[in-house]
Image: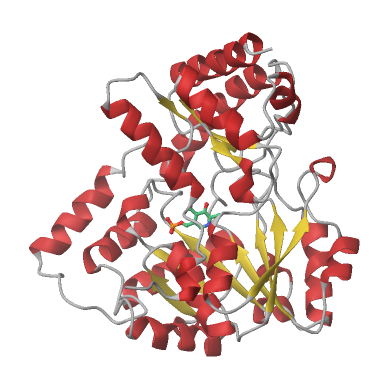
Amino acid sequence: MDIAKRVKTLTPSSTLAITAKAKELKEQGYDVIGLGAGEPDFNTPEHIIEAAKEAMDQGRTKYTPTGGVVDLKKAIIHKFKNDNDLDYNLNEIIVTSGAKHALYTLFQVILDEGDDVIVPAPYWVSYPEQIKLAGGNPVFIEAKEEHDFKITIDQLQKAITDKTKAIIINSPSNPTGMMYTKEELQAIGELCLQHNLLIVSDEIYEKLIYTSEQHISIASLSNALKEQTVVINGVSKSHAMTGWRIGYAAGPETIIKAMTNLASHSTSNPTSIAQYGALAAYQSKVDPTIEMRKVFAERLDALYDLIVAIPGVTCKKPQGAFYLFPNVSEAVKLNGFDNVDDWVKSLLEKEKVAVVPGSGFGAPDNIRLSYAISKDQLEEAANRIKRFVEQHK
Ligand code: PLP
């Protein structure tokens, strides 16, 4: 059976591929250290698990409204007000099966064949594929390392054409951990308003910031910007709930309504039990991000120092998320490899350290290291990478 053309060209997620390879080697008995994980290594807090069990015991195991149960939507509205100073009503929120599916559904409803979406590179691996699946074209702007992996207004101005429909802003960013300042967001926002571009603001890492900078939602900068932005968020990273698959989108009613219509024919609704777990996450006074932030910040400092001490490796220190995104191009050359992908494969074979090559993120000189594993393991991994670089000169 021939597979449909639009799916045939899909690139499998490079993050999931490396995690699978590392798992395979582990199962063969190798002592593999995986730095590929895109999820916190903490357990979902107990009160959330209890709430889901209770939901099951109470028979909340049936279909829910497509866009999510009203109480959860209300809790999300409250979260937006508290955290982001944003006012939404129930018709401006859709709960989805993870933030990934919120993005997927959004691109399906806003893009017509041939529409362009501006994607700053490095980017999260799924953006370009999702845009293409919706018939759109990702238009990449290289967010240069010397500009802290952030696009400039000049670059944005040059990239906008009559075909540009939307732009993605992901701050803090996966994979770079960089954040846009309020002034930068303001300038980007103004340009988007001038050109009538929809802003897709992926704020999934908003709670994981390790500097004194505050997360700012571009939607909160003015009413006009709120009307022109769809905010994407979820509980996967903030509450260590990746497997529960609860995310959401907030934005103009017409877009949310169209997304809800589409979801009614695809997912019907996100898992009922998981929605009650997410409700408990938002209703509880317990904030798991405080502990997570502390642990991640310590690991970031430890790993960063070890990584920049490796010959041929340079790295911008990230502000948020849980990844380092070092440039290894010099080390790759030193080791006699033609490209980072081959170097990464050899690192896994020789030293049993799994890292994700930057090529999948649109940054072929870099690798992504997740620090969602213990500090001891991170130190061991950094030592192995150092040994790999030094031995292969
Ligand atoms: N956006 C970014 C930037 C991410 O890194 C991820 C997960 O890795 C997602 C969205 C999707 O998160 P979810 O688990 O809610 O689908």
Is residue 212 positioned above or below 196 on the image? above
Which residue shows up at 70% across the image and 22% down it? Answer: 336
Quadrant placement of the N terminus: bottom left
Is residue 80 positioned above or below 330 on the image? below
The colour scheme is secondary structure
- Which of the 4 image quadrants contains residue 254? bottom right
Which residue shows up at 67% across the image and 39% down it? Answer: 319
Quadrant placement of the C terminus: top right
Is residue 224 positioned above or below 3 on the image? below
Is residue 282 positioned above or below 393 on the image? below
Instruction: Say if residue 252 shows up in the picture.
Output: yes
Instruction: Say if residue 77 shows up in the picture.
Output: no
> Residue 312, position in %: x, y?
74, 21
Which residue shows up at 34% across the image and 34% down it? Answer: 23
In the figure, is residue 231 to the left or right of 338? Answer: left
In the figure, is residue 95 to the left or right of 65? Answer: right
**Outermost front residue:** 1
> Residue 303, position in %: x, y?
59, 22
Q: Looking at the image, which is closer to me, 12 or 101?
A: 12
- Which of the 4 image quadrants contains residue 76? bottom left
In the figure, is residue 37 to the left or right of 189? Answer: left
Q: How many marks?
A: 0
> Residue 234, position in %: x, y?
45, 60
Q: Looking at the image, which is closer to me, 295 or 26?
A: 26
In the figure, is residue 218 to the left or right of 152? Answer: left
> Residue 132, position in %: x, y?
57, 72
Which residue shows up at 64% across the image and 16% down it? Answer: 389
Q: Looking at the image, which is closer to me, 55 or 299?
A: 299
Q: Looking at the image, which is closer to me, 152 or 239?
A: 152
